[in-house]
Image (tube, grey):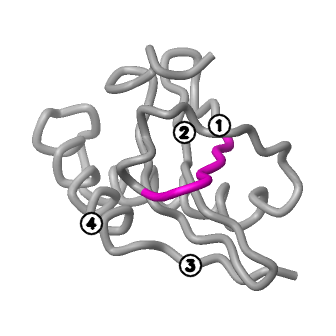
Amino acid sequence: MREVKFDNLALSYLYDLAKLLFDKEYFSFVETADKYIDDIIVFILKNIHTFPHKKAPAYFSKYGKNLFYISYNRNQRTTWYILFEKTNAHFLIRYITNNHKEGQFFE
């Protein structure tokens, strides 16, 4: 099974996202915001090996070459897009975004 690795940019985004979600009062408790991020990470680790991969739109080529993505429907309003490179040895998570930020670039 391929190893799953996270680029520093993707990790930084997730850690900053937890703080942003709490600061903007999407969550009342820091622990709840942290759990939301943990759920995204767990989804990636459990599903990247089996979910159908789609070729990432050209717009995202600034984050790497030959990127693929999987999507995670967290709730009715938010879909997360996990962009990654894959080799025979690993999946490298390069960038994470959602339908509120860059959804217009996905099908």
User: Looking at the image, do the residues carrying marks 4 and 2 touch, with CB atoms under 8 Å apart?
Assistant: no
Q: Say whether disc 1 or disc 3 marks the residue closer to the N-terminus.
A: 3
- Find residue 71 and name its label: 1
Q: Quadrant of residue 50?
A: bottom right
Element carrying mark 3: strand
Q: Amino acid at mark 4?
A: Ser
Q: Is residue 84 left or right of residue 62?
A: right
Q: Say whether disc 1 or disc 2 marks the residue closer to the N-terminus.
A: 1
Furthest residue in direction left, as rendered: 23
Q: Give percent across and percent down for residue 54.
A: 74, 38
Question: Which residue is pictured at 64% across the width and 38% down the height?
Answer: 72
Q: Say whether disc 4 or disc 2 marks the residue closer to the N-terminus.
A: 4
Question: Which residue is pictured at 65% across the width and 76% down the height?
Answer: 4
Q: Name above or below for residue 78 compared with residue 54.
A: above
User: Looking at the image, do the residues carrying marks 1 and 2 touch, with CB atoms under 8 Å apart?
Assistant: yes
In front here: 101 or 54?
A: 54
User: Looking at the image, do the residues carrying marks 3 and 4 touch, with CB atoms under 8 Å apart?
Assistant: no
In three-dimensional space, the C-alpha distance between marks 4 and 2, rounded to whole angstroms, equals 16 Å
- Find residue 5 and name its label: 3
In front here: 17 or 96?
A: 96
User: Looking at the image, do the residues carrying marks 1 and 3 touch, with CB atoms under 8 Å apart?
Assistant: no
In front here: 76 or 5?
A: 5
